[in-house]
Amino acid sequence: MSTDAPIAADVPQDVPEGFEPLFRKSPLTKPWEPLYARKTDRAVIIGVRLARPHTNGRGLIHGGLIAALADNAMGYSCAQATGWRTTFVTISLAVDFVGTANIGQWLTVESDVIKTGSTICFAQSLIKADDVTIARANGTFRVVPKNDVVVPGRE
C-alpha cells in the first residue's frame, strides 16, 4: 500500500478486522492517510494508526486531528443513518479532551447518531486510542438536500 504521508517504518501498520480504506478523501485529511472506516447500520467508525504526521510540536497527538476526524465520523454517521439520501454540514462541534495517545496506537472515532430530523441531525462520538477513551465530541449538523449547492460561508 502506498501513501503520500511519511509513516515511520517502526510504527506497526496493521489494521483491525473490518476496517477498509476510508471511502471519502479530502484535501484536509490527505496528509493523515492512510485513514480507515468500518460501517455499521447507523454509524461510520473512522480509524487510523497514529504516526508522526498526527502530532503537534510537542510530539502529542494533535487536538485538531481529533476534532476533524470526529466531525467527519459524526457527519458520515448522520448520512449512514439516513441512507445517504442527504448531505450534512456542521452547525456546531464540541470536543472534550480527557487523555492523549501515542504514535503507534490505533485511534478510532466511534459515533452514535442521537436524533435525525428533516433539518437537523445530532450525533456524539467517543475517540479511543487502543480502546481507551481520550476524547468525546458532540456535533449538530444541518440536513442539506443533495440537489442544493452549499457555498462555504453561505449556509
Image (tube, rainbow, N blue to C red):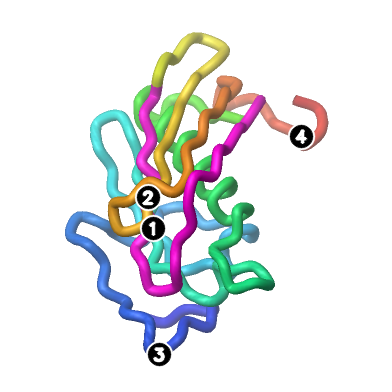
Q: Is the magenta stretch mostly helix, strand or loop?
A: strand
| Quadrant for the N terminus in the image | bottom left
Mark nearer the N terminus (2 vs 3): 3
Q: Quadrant of residue 39?
A: top left
Residue at the disc numbered 3: 9
Residue at the disc numbered 2: 128
* Residue contact between numbered discs 2 and 3, judged by CB atoms under 8 Å: no
Q: Is mark 2 on a helix, strand or loop?
A: strand
| Quadrant for the C terminus in the image | top right
Mark nearer the N terminus (3 vs 1): 3
Q: Say if the magenta span includes residue 73.
A: no
- Between disc 4 and disc 2, the foreground one is 2
Q: Residue 135 location in percent, x, y?
A: 47, 44
Residue at the disc numbered 1: 107
Residue lying at 57% horizontally and 73% vertically, measured from the top left: 53
Residue at the disc numbered 4: 151
Q: How far apart are marks 4 and 1 (CA)?
A: 32 Å
Residue lying at 64% horizontally and 72% vertically, measured from the top left: 58
Q: Residue 57 location in percent, x, y?
A: 68, 72
Asked if 96 appears above or below 48 in the picture, the reply is: above
- The type of residue carrying mark 1 is Leu
Crowdedness of circle 4 by 10 Å Cα count: few (<14), some, many (20+)?
A: few
Residue lying at 54% horizontally and 63% vertically, measured from the top left: 61
Mark nearer the N terminus (2 vs 1): 1
- Residue at far left of view: 17
- Residue at far bottom of view: 9
Mark nearer the N terminus (4 vs 1): 1
